[in-house]
Image (cartoon, rainbow, N blue to C red):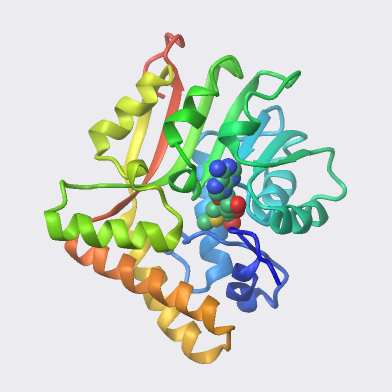
Amino acid sequence: MSRDVFDTAERALNAESGHTTVWSNLGYWRDQSQYPKAAEALARLLADAVDLGAQDAVLDLGFGMGEQLRLWRQAYGVQTLHGVNASASQNAVARQCVADADYQLSEGHAETVLPLPGAPAFSKVLMLDCAYHFVSRASVLGRLRGHLTPDARVGLTDLYLPRAPSAAEAMALRGMCALSRIPYGNLLSREAYCQQLVQAGLRVQRFTDITAEVFAPFAAWWRRYGARHSFPLRDRLKFATTARFIAAAARRATLGYALVVARPLSDGGGPG
Ligand SMILES: C[S@@+](CC[C@H](N)C(=O)[O-])C[C@H]1O[C@@H](n2cnc3c(N)ncnc32)[C@H](O)[C@@H]1O
């Protein structure tokens, strides 16, 4: 059976909600011990950082199996949303999550689907735990030009490099990126990351390192959860490899995780 590059395997991580959720991010574990709650907490952290609300016109890139779409609708009252996600199998699940909403969901890579002809100017753009997977984050950010209201906010939770890796560390990072479908060029220092946003006509309003609340606790949770649940071997290897790698990366500070909020450069307001 052929599988999408990004598929629905992460459904299996959601047993603690009785499989009523379909999250597939790394989670924000500060006050959580179960995966579905931690994944929701990461989504809420992002939504709250951009002040998501009912009046927003939202562009959501990399929405996975759509659990976040359900959250935006039910908890934040979002009515107007265009989503772009790279996976047919995930999008089929997502459509069920928001069958009652008037959301426009497109299938494809954001770097080819954008710009969206005839779309409204978006007041919020969300990239929840996905931009590091884009074939080119720079290209996607560049394609937001012309899609944003003057006071729009663009929010991401994303990987970055907290320090320059040694040659051996860079080799290990490259290997992990290849296994995890992360283009290595998307891993940037904080300075280069902010510069990439500037080149797309955005200025960084907030860049908060949240590595400690994401990497090690996800890995610790996986060790407990993985021991108690069965998975197809391929999926177990994927989750176990991710967990081991990010735990090691957190210990050695070779990889970091950040909450980022940016605004159009033309917006004259100061930091919010
Ligand atoms: C780690 S998952 C996170 C999913 C979701 N945001 C969540 O929190 O559950 C990464 C997502 O990025 C999507 N993705 C990867 N590359 C993409 C691209 N170039 N354009 C749009 N979506 C992409 C994948 O289909 C996948 O759903």
> Which residue is most to the front?
1
Q: Quadrant of the C terminus?
A: top left
In the rendering, at what x and y percent does residue 113 appear? 65, 32
| Image x and y of residue 154, in percent | 50, 30
Residue at the extreme right: 100
Name the residue nearer the viewer: 62 or 19. Answer: 62
Q: Is residue 6 left or right of residue 267?
A: right
Q: What is the number of callouts on the image? A: 0
Q: Can I make out residue 30 in this image?
A: no
Q: Tell me: residue 265, above or below residue 48.
A: above
From the viewer's perspective, is residue 243 above or below residue 113? below
Q: Nearer the viewer, residue 270 or 132?
A: 132
Residue 98 visible somewhere in the drawing: yes
Residue 13 horizontal side relative to residue 217, left or right: right
Task: State the residue in front, 30 or 84.
Answer: 84
The answer to whether 229 is drawn above or below residue 36 in the figure is: below
- Out of 223 and 110, give the one closest to the viewer: 110
What residue appears at the point 71 percent right and 72 percent down from the top-left corner? 1
Q: Position of residue 22 (x, y in %)?
A: 66, 64
Which residue sits furthest left?
166
Residue at 27% from the left image edge and 55% from the top image edge:
255
The quarter of the displayed image where residue 121 is located: top right
Residue 95 percent across, percent down from the top left: 80, 51
